[in-house]
């Protein structure tokens, strides 16, 4: 996330969202989704992607699949 959003990891937490991270725009959201799907070998549905509003939402989606969301 830090690399895609061009933001120091120390500034990212589970509440981080497009309002708190300047580079989190629609394009980078697409890149972020793609990268998370590749790294964790998952595929989000359209409905799931529309539900993702912050970093914590990524964690929740991964944990529902039995993946350790702490790694995100």
Image (tube, rainbow, N blue to C red):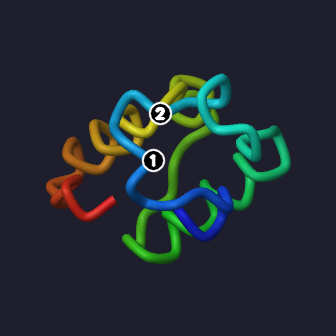
Give coordinates of residue 39: x percent, y percent.
44, 76
In the picture of the structure, the residue carrying the numbered disc 1 is 11
Identify the image quadrant of residue 40: bottom left
Q: Secondary structure at mark 1?
A: helix
| Circle 2 SS class | loop
Q: Which residue is mark 2?
A: 16
Instruction: Please tell me in which quadrant of the rendered image residue 20 appears.
Output: top right
Q: Which percent across, then down, holds residue 9?
A: 43, 60
Identify the residue shown where x is 35% and y is 41%: 13
- What count of labels does the image hold? 2
Q: Is residue 63 left or right of residue 10?
A: left
Q: Which quadrant would residue 45 be assigned to in this image?
A: top right
Q: Residue at x 76, y 52 (%)?
A: 28
Q: CA distance from mark 1 to mark 2?
A: 8 Å
Circles 1 and 2: CB distance less than 8 Å? Answer: yes
In the image, is residue 26 above or below residue 54?
Answer: below
Q: Nearer the viewer, residue 41 or 56?
A: 56
């Amino acid at each position: 996330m830090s690399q895609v959003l061009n933001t120091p990891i120390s500034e990212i937490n589970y509440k981080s969202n497009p309002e708190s991270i300047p580079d989190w725009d629609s394009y980078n959201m697409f890149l972020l989704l793609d990268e998370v799907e590749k790294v964790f070998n998952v595929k989000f549905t359209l409905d799931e992607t529309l539900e993702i509003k912050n970093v914590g939402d990524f964690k929740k989606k991964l944990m529902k699949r039995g993946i350790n969301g702490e790694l995100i």
